[in-house]
Image (cartoon, rainbow, N blue to C red):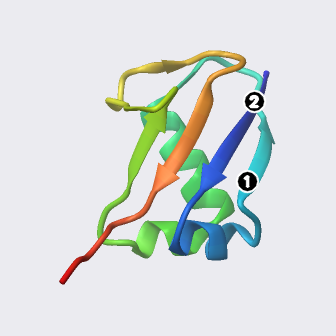
C-alpha cells in the first residue's frame, strides 16, 4: 500500500519536502509508522515529541492506517 505523510514545521525540514510517499507491504499501525519514519529519517527520533494525525484527527499508536488515509506529522509546538 502507498501512503503519503504530510510534514509541517521541523518535520518538513527533516523530510526535505512538505510530503513524502512510502510503500508498505504489511498492515501498519501508527506505532509501526513511527518506527519506519524514525529509521528512514533519524532526526525525527531526536524530537522531544510529535503527533501523528490520520484524516485530521490525532491518532493513537494502535490505530491501523488504511490506503487513502491522509497522514500528517505534527511536530512539537511552542508558543509565547
The quarter of the picture where the N terminus appears is: top right
Q: Is residue 40 above or below residue 77?
A: above
Q: Identify the disc placed on residue 19.
A: 1
* Comes first in the chain, label 2 or label 1: 1
**Which residue: 54% across, 44% down?**
72
The quarter of the picture where the C terminus appears is: bottom left
Q: Residues within 10 Å of mark 1 (few under 14, many from 20)?
A: some
**Tag 2–tag 1 contact (CB < 8 Å):** no
**Which residue: 62% across, 17% down?**
27
Q: Quadrant of residue 41 in the image?
A: bottom right
Q: Is residue 63 above or below residue 30?
A: above
Q: Is residue 79 left or right of residue 8?
A: left
Q: Secondary structure at mark 1?
A: strand
Q: Position of residue 26 (x, y in %)?
A: 69, 19
**Which residue: 55% across, 59% down?**
38
**Which residue: 31% across, 62% down?**
49
Q: Residues within 10 Å of mark 2 (few under 14, many from 20)?
A: few
Q: Is residue 24 above or below residue 33?
A: above
Pick out the residue farthest to the front: 80
Question: Marks 2 and 1, Cα distance to the nearest angstrom?
Answer: 16 Å
Q: Quadrant of residue 14 in the image?
A: bottom right
Q: Position of residue 68 (x, y in %)?
A: 71, 19
Q: Is residue 8 above or below residue 48?
A: above
Pick out the residue farthest to the bottom: 80
Q: Which residue is mark 2?
A: 24
Q: Secondary structure at mark 2?
A: loop
Q: Identify the disc placed on residue 28.
A: none
Amino acid at each position: 500500500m502507498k501512503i503519503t505523510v504530510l510534514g509541517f514545521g521541523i518535520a518538513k525540514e527533516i523530510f526535505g519536502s512538505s510530503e513524502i510517499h512510502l510503500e508498505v507491504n504489511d498492515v501498519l499501525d501508527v506505532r509501526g509508522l513511527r518506527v519506519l519514519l524514525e529509521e528512514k529519517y533519524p532526526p525525527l527520533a531526536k524530537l522531544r515529541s510529535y503527533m501523528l494525525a490520520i484524516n485530521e484527527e490525532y491518532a493513537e499508536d494502535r490505530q491501523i492506517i488504511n490506503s487513502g488515509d491522509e497522514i500528517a506529522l505534527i511536530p512539537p509546538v511552542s508558543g509565547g
